[in-house]
Amino acid sequence: MNAAPSPEPAAPARQIGVTPNFFAQHNGSRFRTPVDLQVTPDCASHFLVVGGCLAQPIPDIAAMISPDYKGDFILLNNFDAFPEIPPAQAQEYDFQIIHIPLRSVFGNAYFQLPDDVARHEEFLQQTQDYLARYLANVVKLNTQHKLLTFVLGFMVPQQNQRGRFQPRYDVRNVMHFVERLNMFLAAEVAKLENAHFVDIDQISGSIGKKNVQDDTVWSFTHGTSLSDGDHDHDLNRIQPPTSMQQHYSARWLEFFEALLHEIFAMHRTLKQQDTVKLVAVDLDDTLWRGVAAEGTLGVLEGWPMGFIETLLILKRRGILLAIVSKNDEAFIRSNWNSIVQGQISLADFAVLKINFRSKAENLAEILQEVNLRPENAVMIDDNPVERAAIQTRLPAVRVLGSQLYYLKRVLLWSAETQTGAITAESARKTEMVQAQLQRESARKELSHEEFLQTLDLRVSLAVLHDTKDVHMSRALELFNKTNQFNTIGVRYTLEECHQLFVSGHQLFIIQAEDRFTKYGLVGAAWVNQNCIEHLVMSCRALGLGIEDSFVSWLANHLAEKKTPTLLGQLQFTTANLACRQIFSRNGFNSLAENSILWSRALELPLALPRHVTLSVSSGKAAEAGHPLASIDDRKLPGTGEVLHGADKVELATAAR
């Protein structure tokens, strides 16, 4: 009997290739700083480089990357005195890069020490003292002017000079000695304002230490890049050697490019360019392998576990997570833990849209519910048809998913998903948004006025006087990330904030909580004498009258100080529709001679809404004679009335 013919093998699915351009974009000097989420090009930068020979090529290589990068170099070896730089010149720099030559603090005594742990620990302490003194000398522009500063660490040597069988984490091992110096330097930099440690050892490791570092040839204490810098000195030998790059695969140019990309990426993050605030994910063949409802689930190990891990890290950074999936919600909910094997909870996602509607419509609905713009969202989906539909409906949304092996690195390493500081508000953002959605659900069941009366809304004000305040990071984050309620749309560096404080400005912070949750620090305002120059409010706090409460308190406080008028600045932007009525509804009039300036006479009080309880915290004493020099502790329950000239309106109604 003839055997039955074997079935024809199924045609293999078309694989997604890797083009040379795509490969180049994700390897080499760009490996650590992917640009898949970058929308806005890097802006021109003028920066200062201070340090030894390792740092000297940085300005020229930056200009090779882009002619918009202009760097000035100051050579400082050993303990040279830092030159005097006029304040006007210092203000021209966007940031500075500091390199401390390892030789300047390490010296050559290390290899002359007795083979004794205690003696090496003593030498380490002396070296750390030298390092602290050197750092204090070279960061004067930071300490005096709060100039944004990036301090380069040291490259760790490649081998334990004592031998492969000797203890790795022993201070007598030069590798560990330099690691301890890096730990110390990072801690010292963390004590400074507006200064950040750059781990160049990690950059060297990414490219390959054998291709970057000079410790295979030169002294361990030299600590710079492998190059042909001294080849000319060896040409008079009987047999002159060929250049260093013919003996070793020297990739020093790639190293410097990667270093600069790292610093430019950090600069982008601090400027909050193209910030990602929400990541929405599909489920089948995106969060896990296979289709759950069809019973074709694959193993979770591998990239799915890496992706789940990534989402949890993003959540801790303050990025909201959402699910947008065409699935049976009841099935997904009942089988969730068995599918993901307990690695992530549905509660880790701020919003769920699991249904058979258009994913583009679901995503648009999510953005509306959480008060975010499409520009701040990323959607990840394995289906090219769905990705195309989302990009057609929401062109500003960044869409990923075609290359699943890149998801973890792009989401974790991109400048757009990082933040200069993880604040308490950032870490609790998912919980706060879930409470916001619960609050909005309750709002639908009551009239707006009834809803506000049930909130038990408590608002507290405090004033900051310098950039060292513990709340400064969150306040700066609000100014630089808020778009919808942002009265003038200006972004700030910490250096610019320092200058505002020096000029007499005060920074008010606004915190809030209600019966649903503690929202934390949701608003901030720069006030100069009797003018609200800049007011921002988190989107999750809009529509509750919090911003009106601040304006009302400030008006009454200034009236007590016999100040005749309160001013406010309002500059229309493409995104700040939510704040355009803040002054008009509180009795301000636009000044004909200055279209962005609004004014309100203070002879009539501006009452707080009845649903708000306001407390004001004491601040440091301001300069004598400043109208806000004394702020006492008190609680101010609302009266519900706001006087607009001769008219009375309910703030609760006006604040809708």
Image (cartoon, rainbow, N blue to C red):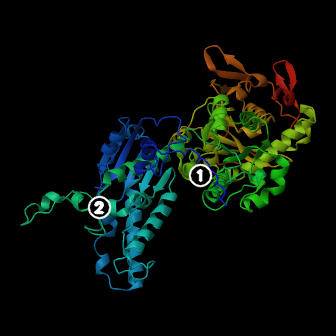
In this rendering, position of residue 61 left or right of residue 381: left
Label 1's element?
loop
In what quadrant of the picture does the C terminus appear? top right
Write down the residue under mark 2. 78
* Residue farthest to the front, as pictured: 1
* First of labels 2, 1 by sequence position: 2
Pick whichever, 212 or 609, lies toward us: 212
Cα distance between the residues tagged 2 and 1: 33 Å
Residue 499 location, x and y as percent? 51, 40
Residue 130 lies in quadrant: bottom left
Which quadrant holds the N terminus?
Answer: bottom right
Tag 1 residue? 421
Amino acid under disc 2:
Asn
Q: Position of residue 418 (x, y in %)?
A: 57, 49
Q: Nearer the viewer, residue 549 or 390?
A: 390
Which amino acid, by three-letter code, is at mark 1? Ala
